[in-house]
Image (cartoon, coloured by chain):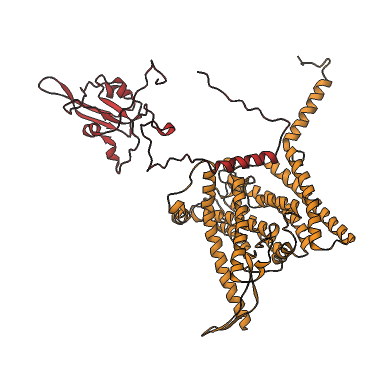
Chain colours: A red, B orange
């Protein structure tokens, strides 16, 4: 898709100073009575519902979620692909195995400070277990709280993000 | 001390305290208003967190500025760096002392206090802290002292941005001071007096000077904007070019003092505008405002406030509408347009007054209406000329002339000229 460049035609001869000033003043005055566009943030928030410009994009990549199966166990099989692909090296995974030979994570930690929110972990995951989420309010009172462990990753309630689909580049 | 002198001192001190408080609080609220106006003009809401509709925002800003760390560049000139904010701040506040803010009040009292003795005041009390006979000459003198603060702040910071800001400020203010002073001479010619009370009396009897001296009004308005370094003439600050201009290196309360000075100057120039050209505290079409009752004083003050406030709003409105002048355009406008216009207008008014004297039109009303006709015609000619860019073409005019000259040379030299393919 070509980028449209707006070429402004500069007035060469019909320069006006006083009229242009008055026109500008009229414009700014008119703007004083228009609807305000400010979002009153802590009271109003970006949500997923369709509210025009203020809704969060479905492709927003925020802090992670680990999805769980029906028994409430994490879907992760500790295959090790996400720590492998992670460009920021922020995922710590120690695999374990139970008596039936099912693999599961003994330790699964994501350091949200190191994370660059590229979404590769979600893309690479064969079990659709780890996801980046549609969430942006991450404040904590201490640095250590930014290392999310498995329990925290599983209990995050926010929606997961939809990754970009090459066959449908515009999300239609 | 005589009882009369003590009475005078008492009312003066009361007026002083009231004016000082009102100006300081007003300036604080103006900083909020500026942010609100800018926000509204950009479809935003502006500060609305501190207090109802953000009314406590100035207090929060003040508290923050007092608590912040004072920094000083290592290579700065210590004494001047510390003195400069005060030197900008004091003249700005001094000016509020001489502007009459309401109709005179009839005040008679005679009482005795245990230790201080007897206080007496009789007759009309002018509602101004100091009703000095030098009037607007005092204002011109003191307002030009404000540039010392700015120029010295720029110089003593020992920073390139600050120095450029200070240099620009001094050049700009010196240039526009001339046009501003000249634009007030017609007021003097028409009134025959420089004191503010005389100017207001003359306007009460005839017309507000905005009509008979329209060109002066226009020149004073533009020069006034330039004097107080407000957009479109804010080259000393010019945040896109000079970071923050002359106060780049200032922090905390010292920075705040430059800010207060700027807004106090804005109040003063608006009050000057209201007093000299819009009739001061005069309520049009009635003489009731001179009765000296408390109610008349209050209502006339409301009128004065409304005039000052509309002018302040206009200054803010212009700021959020117009882009900044380029430096050469600023100088061209000052020296090649404002000054000649102001000088020529002095001649026109002097000649018109002399001519009317010869014709025997001496009634103040007749003179004012005749001058109104002359001024409005001149005003229209000047504004149309400005609009067409005939008066201040700036470098664009020069560029167009150069391009035309180059085209002519090219045409003349075409046959046989080498390398013209």
Identify which residue is drawn at 54% across, 60% down. B24
Q: Quadrant of residue B242?
A: top right
The residue at the far right in this view is B358
Say which of B406 and B26 sits in front. Answer: B26
Identify which residue is drawn at 38% across, 15% down. A167
- Residue A161 percent across, percent down from the top left: 33, 27
| Number of numbered discs on residues | 0
Horizontally, residue B377 falls left or right of residue A10, namely right
Position above or below: A132 against B188: above
Q: Quadrant of residue B232?
A: top right
The residue at the far left in this view is A99
- Residue A22 percent across, percent down from the top left: 66, 42
Horizontally, residue B420 falls left or right of residue A114, namely right
- Residue A62 appears in the picture as rendered: yes
- Residue B322 appears in the picture as rendered: no
- Residue B249 percent across, percent down from the top left: 53, 49
Say which of B225 and B151 sits in front. Answer: B225
Say which of B219 and B1 sits in front. Answer: B219
| Position of the N terminus of chain B by quadrant | bottom right
Say which of B61 and B359 sits in front. Answer: B359
- Residue A152 percent across, percent down from the top left: 23, 34
| Position of the C terminus of chain B by quadrant | top right
């Amino acid at each position: 898709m070509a980028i449209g460049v707006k070429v402004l035609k500069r007035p060469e001869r019909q320069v006006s100073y006083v009229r242009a000033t008055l026109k500008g003043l009229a414009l700014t005055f008119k703007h004083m009575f228009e609807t305000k566009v400010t979002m009153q943030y802590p009271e109003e928030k970006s949500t997923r519902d369709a509210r025009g410009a203020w809704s969060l994009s479905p492709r927003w990549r925020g802090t992670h979620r680990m999805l769980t199966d029906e028994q409430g166990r994490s879907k992760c099989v500790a295959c090790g692909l996400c720590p492998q692909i992670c460009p920021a090296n922020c995922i710590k995974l120690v695999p374990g195995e139970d008596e039936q030979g099912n693999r599961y994570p003994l330790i699964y930690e994501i350091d949200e400070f190191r994370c660059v929110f590229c979404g590769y972990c979600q893309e690479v995951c064969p079990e659709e277990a780890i996801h980046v989420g549609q969430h942006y309010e991450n404040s904590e009172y201490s640095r250590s709280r930014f290392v999310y462990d498995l329990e925290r990753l599983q209990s995050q309630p926010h929606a997961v993000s939809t990754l970009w689909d090459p066959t449908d580049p515009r999300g239609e | 001390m005589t009882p009369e002198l003590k009475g005078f001192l008492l009312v003066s001190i009361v007026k002083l305290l009231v004016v000082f408080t009102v100006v300081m609080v007003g300036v604080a609220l103006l900083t909020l208003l500026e942010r609100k106006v800018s926000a509204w003009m950009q479809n935003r809401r502006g500060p609305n967190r501190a207090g109802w509709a953000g009314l406590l925002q100035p207090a929060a800003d003040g508290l923050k500025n007092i608590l912040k760390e004072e920094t000083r560049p290592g290579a700065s000139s210590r004494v001047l760096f510390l003195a400069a904010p005060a030197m900008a701040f004091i003249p700005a506040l001094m000016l509020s002392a001489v502007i009459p803010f309401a109709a005179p009040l009839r005040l008679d009292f005679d009482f005795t206090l245990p230790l201080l003795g007897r206080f007496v005041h009789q007759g009309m009390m002018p509602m101004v802290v100091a009703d000095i006979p030098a009037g607007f000459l005092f204002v011109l003198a003191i307002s030009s002292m404000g540039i010392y603060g700015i120029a010295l702040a720029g110089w003593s910071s020992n920073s390139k941005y600050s120095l450029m800001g200070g240099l620009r400020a001094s050049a700009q203010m010196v240039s526009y001071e001339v046009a501003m002073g000249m634009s007030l001479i017609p007021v003097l010619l028409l009134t025959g007096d420089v004191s503010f009370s005389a100017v207001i009396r003359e306007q009460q009897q005839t017309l507000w000077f905005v009509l008979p001296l329209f060109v002066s009004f226009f020149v004073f308005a533009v020069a006034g904007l330039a004097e107080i370094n407000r957009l479109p003439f804010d080259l000393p600050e010019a945040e896109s070019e000079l970071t923050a201009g002359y106060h780049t290196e200032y922090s905390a309360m010292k920075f705040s003092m430059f800010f207060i000075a700027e807004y106090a100057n804005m109040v003063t120039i608006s009050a000057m505008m209201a007093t000299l050209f819009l009739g001061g505290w005069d309520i049009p079409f009635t003489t009731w405002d001179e009765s000296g009752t408390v109610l008349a004083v209050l209502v006339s003050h409301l009128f004065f406030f409304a005039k000052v406030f509309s002018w302040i709003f206009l200054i803010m409105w212009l700021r959020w509408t117009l882009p900044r002048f380029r430096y050469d355009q600023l100088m061209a406008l000052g020296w090649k347009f404002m000054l000649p216009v102001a000088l020529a207008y002095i001649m026109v008014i002097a000649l018109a007054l002399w001519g009317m004297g010869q014709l025997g039109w001496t009634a103040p009303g007749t003179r004012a209406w005749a001058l109104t006709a002359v001024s409005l015609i001149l005003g229209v000619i000047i504004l149309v000329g400005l609009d067409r860019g005939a008066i201040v073409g700036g470098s664009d005019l020069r560029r167009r002339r150069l391009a035309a000259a180059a085209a002519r040379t090219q045409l003349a030299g075409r046959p046989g000229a080498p390398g013209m393919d």
